[in-house]
Image (spheres, helix red, strand yellow):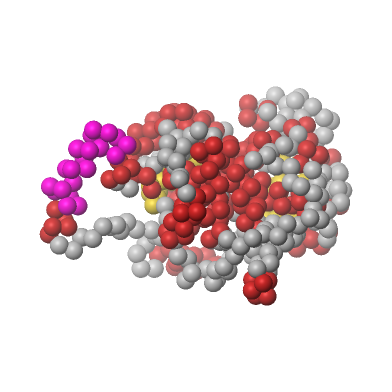
Amino acid sequence: MDKDYTKKALEYHSDGKPGKIEVAPSKPVESAEDLSLAYSPGVAAPVIEIGKDRWNAYRYTNKGNLVAVVSNGSAVLGLGDVGATASKPVMEGKAMLFKLFADIDAFDIELSEEDPEEFIRIVQDLSPTFGGINLEDIKAPECFLIEEKLRSLLGIPVLHDDQHGTAVVVTAALINAFKITERYVKDAKIVICGAGSAGISTAKMLLAVGVVKENIVMFDSKGAITTTRTDIDVYKAIFATNSNIRSLRDAMTDADVFIGLSKGNILADDDLRVMAPNPIIFALANPVPEISYERAKSIRGDAIVATGRSDYPNQINNVLAFPYLFRGALDTLSTTINEHMMIAAANAIADVAKMQFFNGEAEQNGSCFVIDKECIVPKPGDKCLLTQVSTAVARAAMESGVARRRIASFTEYENTLLQRVDNENFFAKERKRCNRTRKPNNNNREREIQS
């Protein structure tokens, strides 16, 4: 990060009120009567009703629209273990994005706790306050245990975004990339570089949508994950290959897909040259990708290239997923966010990319943008993400039996969602295309993604 940008970022966070979020009342407090209703003695009435039935908390408090963003700062961005306090700007930012994109209130909670069991106990004790828990920037393999245990204990949506948010958006991008390159999911040979929380969860989700495990080769910092290694944990062992692949170059030979969730500048030019025709290259390390967008395109002009950066096409960003996963889960009072809901989200995100219009003429005529190599995912903040992804998640929650509340009319639900947010002053003028009919692209093979 250059000095000018660092200065600008520090000024952004410190000007006016320090930080990025605040708490504001949602009810009028303009008179003594308002105050008496909001607090004493009026507050006793909802307390009594909730005491009779705890589900009344969703009626009389903000529990049903409140998410905790919880971290111990052990794996922050590309900065590593910076500790709880230093992670606070990231968690504040996550809380801000929840509100901005899905009208979900969120509190950031930074815990100075490295022990997984104690971390679980603290979050469990805090859980009556919240309708959902978003775990963030917790190192592997502890993050797997923490999420698994909290999901089993709490009965509310729990999501480790570094795992599942990444997995959902990568899967959505691959859906469209496979369609463009006319590949079948079951035939795709995939190299995943990075075996932390994002890499493991992405690989698991790819299996769920039809990728063959034997077609995945995964690397960690010590090399290929193979069945002959004795230094891998149970999570990595799931993806251990019994092939004689040892080097990244070996794995990249004839590979259809590279997914980088590791560190910058690890791909050599020849690694790309040996890939299959029309390769799919997701170099997602931030802020420095495994190979730069320009370099990848110059070596393989036939490639689809994505990064985690906003200054290049095809930004793979978790913000395309997590606000809408929680929106759909909260609105159905779901007990969890399960695999069915995440696959539905991935398919919906992929569909939103195909709904984008490429110019004013297309918008006027009502014809839809056809996905191409530089538009395989939507832009962050697209309102169609709010309606389409949240609806898909809510529907999947109902279908899979984890919803405590059913949505009677999805048309009415989508209209309610659009009333929740108004980002017109923050983003470019919204193109009015969310509800228009999409024209099928008959030149591409049918997607082989389970729903």
Judge left or right: residue 320 versus residue 208: left
**Foreground residue, 186 or 278?**
186
Q: Which quadrant, please, contains the N terminus?
A: bottom right
Percent coordinates x, y for residue 54 in the rendering: 29, 35
Res 210 quadrant in image: top right
Percent coordinates x, y for residue 428 in the rendering: 55, 71
Which residue is painted at 83% across and 53% down in the image? 278
Percent coordinates x, y for residue 125 in the rendering: 34, 33
Percent coordinates x, y for residue 230 in the rendering: 70, 24
The magenta segment: 37-56
Q: Is residue 82 visible in this depiction of the protein?
A: no
Judge left or right: residue 112 versus residue 346: left
Judge left or right: residue 39 versus residue 7: left
- Tell me if residue 40 is in the magenta stretch: yes
Which residue is painted at 46% across and 28% down in the image? 152
- Tell me if residue 221 is in the magenta stretch: no
